[in-house]
Structure formats: C-alpha cells, structure tokens
C-alpha cells in the first residue's frame, strides 16, 4: 500500500513498522472500542497518562453511502466512516505555568478502515486553560498501512493550525512539534502492546533510522529553569508552556 499522501503536508513524529499484525487486528484491538464489557483502549491510555474526567464517546457511524469530514482535511478530499468526541482534563503541576491549574482538551476523532490495507485516524484537537489556546489547534493523523503480507507501517503526522495571527507563531509551532514526539511514541508503544495478544504470532517492531528524543525526567523543569537567567519573561514561559500543553493527549507529560 503506498504512503499516505496527506502526510506530506505534516510533520512526521513517528514512523515505525510492526511485523506480524494485520490492519483488521490493529483496528479491532486499538480503535474499535466496540465491546461494552471492555474498557476503551484510548480512555485507558489517557488514564495511564494521569488525565481525569475522561469521556470517550461512542463511535457514530455514517449512513450507507454517506461520510463524515474533518474540516481541515476536507479540502484534500478526505472522508471517514466513523467519528466520536473525546474530552478530558489534567492538572498542570509545573511551577512555570501561567493560567488556570486545570487544562481541558477536546478531540474530534474521525476514522476509516480500507479493508485490510489501511486504517486512518484523524484527530482535531482544541484546548482551554493554556496561553494562546484561542490562536491555534492541532491536527493529528495516525496512518496504519499494510506493507508486505503480514506487516503494518505506522506513520503519525502533526500539523499546527493557526486560527489567529500571533507574533509567537514560529515558537508555538516548533515547541509543539518537538515536545509532542515523546507522547506519540508512548502511544505507539501502547498500540504495539495491545496488538500482542495471546495466541498470535509475536509482534516485532522494526526500528527506523531516526533520532528519538528521550522521555523527560521529573527534573526536566528544574533543568529548564537553570537555563533561563533570572525570572522567565511572560513570552518565554508562555511559549514553553504552550509547547508542552499542545502535546495534548497527554497528562503525564506535565511533569509531577
């Protein structure tokens, strides 16, 4: 299956191959959430990331012959067969933050499965409780496509969508991308683990030739503070905080 064309317009933050897993299996174990007796994969992962007041809405299915569209990628001809709303909160515990202590995240999920060839999840994310939250949103795209007979390539793209003009556009964009990578890597690892079910062939991950940023330690904020001479200015603090917050899925990233 050829690479996803829309990802060319996004910043790639994850690109990995998982062996011995099918598109159907990945969808059913990770994104389907169609068992009333089983906790939502995504909701469970958010809980592990220390988020709370988590709501993972049921999937809404498009009528036969109809489709759902995500406003951002609609112009590229993208359409989806399912959509749902996910919301959650998390506590901002860093001493460098400005604004409310609790952040609220809203995500619109859109998904389609193309047989056993491809699964595309588009996420439109907005949030409240962080600096400049009214100026931008984040579009995320998880694409799983078949490579060979039994393997799946997972690519994750990120696009920072600005709704208003801001002098900090460049800083917000670069901070969001750099600070978000580890979050998507953690989610990918959870996806990989979910695909390793008893009775199936072992799942083997193929590492890509890329530099991966290490997961921050709890002392990261203190290190950052040492690098900033004196009291941080409003601008520098806001940009850093915004970059972290735009790692959206993501409560645990706001270090305790």
Image (cartoon, grey):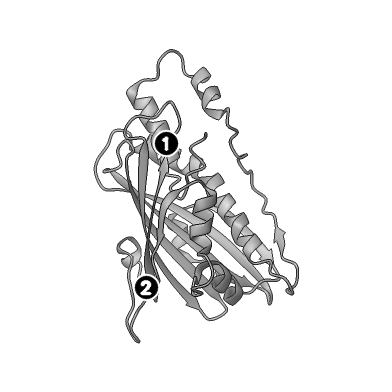
Give the x, y percent position of residue 155: 55, 60
Marker count (numbered): 2
Query: Mark 2: few, some, or many residues within 10 Å (few <14, many ≥20)?
Result: many
Residue that label 2 marks: 79
- Please tell me in which quadrant of the rendered image residue 61 appears: bottom left
Q: Tell which circle, 1 or 2, labels the residue nearer the N-terminal end.
A: 2
- Residue 65 vs 5, above or below: the answer is below
- Which residue shows up at 37% across the image and 50% down it? 105
- The circle drawn on residue 73 is none
Residue occupying the far top of the picture: 230
- Which residue shows up at 56% across the image and 77% down it? 117
Which secondary structure lies at badge 2? Answer: loop
Q: Quadrant of the N terminus?
A: bottom right
Depth order, front residue of 168/245: 245
Give the x, y percent position of residue 244: 45, 38
Direction from residue 43 to residue 59 in the image, left or right: left
Q: Nearer the viewer, mark 1 or mark 2?
A: 1
Which secondary structure lies at badge 1? Answer: loop
Tell me the distance, in whole angstroms, between the alpha carbons under discs 1 and 2: 35 Å
- Please tell me in which quadrant of the rendered image residue 16 appears: bottom right
Give the x, y percent position of residue 212: 62, 44
Residue that label 1 marks: 92
Residue occupying the far front of the picture: 37
Direction from residue 171 to residue 208 in the image, left or right: right
Give the x, y percent position of residue 216: 58, 36
- Asked whether the beta carbons under mark 1 and mark 2 sit within 8 Å of each other, the answer is no
């Amino acid at each position: 299956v050829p690479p996803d064309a829309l990802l060319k317009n996004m910043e790639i933050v994850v690109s990995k191959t998982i062996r011995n897993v099918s598109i159907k299996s990945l969808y059913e174990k990770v994104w389907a959430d169609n068992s009333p007796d089983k906790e939502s994969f995504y909701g469970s992962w958010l809980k592990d990331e220390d988020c709370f007041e988590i709501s993972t809405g049921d999937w809404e299915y498009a009528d036969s012959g109809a489709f759902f569209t995500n406003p951002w990628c609609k112009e590229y001809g993208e359409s989806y067969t399912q959509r749902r709303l996910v919301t959650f909160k998390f506590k901002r515990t860093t001493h460098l933050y400005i604004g409310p202590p609790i952040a609220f995240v809203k995500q619109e999920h859109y998904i389609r499965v193309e047989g056993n060839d491809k699964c595309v999840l588009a996420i439109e994310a907005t949030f409240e409780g962080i600096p400049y939250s009214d100026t931008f949103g984040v579009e995320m795209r998880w694409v799983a496509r078949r490579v060979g007979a039994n393997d799946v390539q997972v690519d994750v793209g990120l696009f920072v969508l600005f709704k208003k003009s801001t002098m900090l556009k460049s800083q917000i964009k670069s901070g969001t991308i750099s600070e978000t990578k580890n979050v998507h890597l953690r989610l990918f690892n959870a996806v990989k683990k979910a695909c390793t079910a008893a009775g199936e062939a072992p799942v083997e991950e193929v590492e890509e030739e890329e530099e991966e940023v290490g997961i921050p330690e709890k002392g990261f904020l203190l290190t950052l503070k040492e690098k900033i001479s004196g009291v941080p200015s409003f601008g520098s603090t806001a940009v850093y905080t915004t970059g972290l917050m735009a790692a959206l899925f993501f409560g645990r990233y706001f270090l305790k």
